[in-house]
Image (cartoon, grey):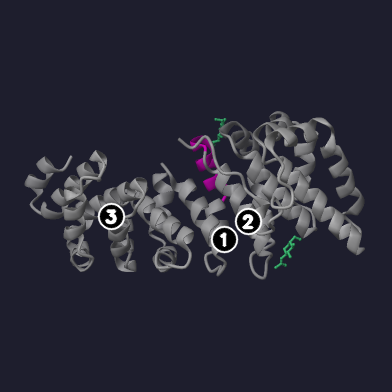
Amino acid sequence: MHTRRPAAHVAAFLNVSACFPLTDVIKLQLVEAGLVECLLEVVAQTVDGEREEDVAQLKTASDLMVLLLLGDESMQKLFEGGKGSVFQRVLSWIPSHNHQLQLAGALAIANFARNDGNCIHMVDTGIVQKLLELLDRHVEEGNVTVQHAALSALRNLAIPVVNKSKMLSAGVADVVLRFLQSEMPPVQFKLLGTLRMLIDTQAEAADQLGTNGKLVERLVEWCEAKDHAGVMGESNRLLSALIRHSKSKEVVRTVIQGGGVKHLVTMATSEHMIMQNEALVALGLIAALDLASAEKDFVGADLVSVLHKLLSDERSAPEIKYNSMILTCAVMGSGETWSSNCCP
Ligand SMILES: *[C@@H]1O[C@H](CO)[C@@H](O)[C@H](O)[C@H]1NC(C)=O
Ligand SMILES: CC(=O)N[C@H]1CO[C@H](CO)[C@@H](O)[C@@H]1O
């Protein structure tokens, strides 16, 4: 399901692509014509320079490098199975002392991480440690653009199932959590996405994060971030994912105590079916695992009328109706013998 992922655009902050509208074909041609070697040469010559034109050239050359990686074919050609000299050079930018190179290096990794094969190779050859060290250097008073780029790279790398546990044991979740207090929505958004990718199918990690009261509290706060739809959506999705992947009563308790139930009820009315479903499954687990504690919040958020709406709306997909029925059943089914028959 997750084989393709969005390219990490420099444009998120710098709006460079507006200046260079390169098509994928042109990107490939530029790569084949050897532009990359020239760019690397410019970088090498200007990296220690302090003159204004050195700084400007370094920025242009490294931004252009990232742009070339936005093309699927040019990216794969430069990756060369992870042995390519370009890939190796870009890797060396990450531990450098130049913020611009760190930024370009992290964005480049995010772009190389657009398919499972590349991600698996990069994780196996130690890229995670390099990114964590980079983030570590940018925790407080750090450069927000670099934070955003490094988190984008980690998020993409965390998508292949085989590498999640490896990234978790490398301590990615702990480092990412150090940015929980960030006030920058782009950083918040990538932080949420990285955690959500990491805990997908990882019950133990979901349990650990889902019982982290500080995290859940922040998620609930972000579920109300109406000015930042992306952060709000990701926050809802992570809240639901913590419950779904842990299936843990402790996590359910933490979410109830943190005031998260009402947000999940609202999420069930999302315009995106995938989010509706994620909400319904999480609410079903809440009802199954701790109905007594959740009851007040279900009533307060008017869950019954949400369910009624989902069940009676002919535009609701069959899957949504089915999960709504299961949830209805779980909410009513306080008698154990009865509910075990009713709720699969
Ligand atoms: C962060 O680093 C980038 C790249 O050097 C630079 O363009 C940007 O101005 C820096 N941002 C801050 C807030 O220092
Ligand atoms: C520990 C872990 O899951 N790492 C894996 C990353 O992916 C490759 C390819 O499947 C495995 O060989 C690693 O063991």
Q: How many marks?
A: 3
Q: CA distance from mark 3 to mark 1?
A: 32 Å
Label 2 is placed on what type of residue?
Answer: Ala
Residue 38 rendering spot, x and y as whole percentages? 88, 41
Q: Does 201 appear above or below 51?
A: above
Determine whether, in the image, residue 297 is placed left or right of residue 11.
left
Circle 3 residue: 249
Give the CA distance from mark 3 to mark 2: 39 Å
At numbered mark 1, what does the secondary structure look like: helix, strand or loop?
Answer: helix
Mark 2: which secondary structure? helix
- Mark 2 CB in 8 Å range of ligand 1? no
The residue to which callout 1 is attached is: 186
Secondary structure of residue under mark 3: helix
CA gap, disc 2 and disc 1: 9 Å
- Which residue has dot 2 on it? 12
For the point 44% across and 49% down, the residue is: 205
The reply to whether discs 3 and 1 touch (Cβ–Cβ < 8 Å) is: no
Horizontally, is 42 left or right of 126 in the view?
A: right
Locate residue 37: give its quadrant: top right
Identify which residue, 7 or 83, lies in the foreground: 7
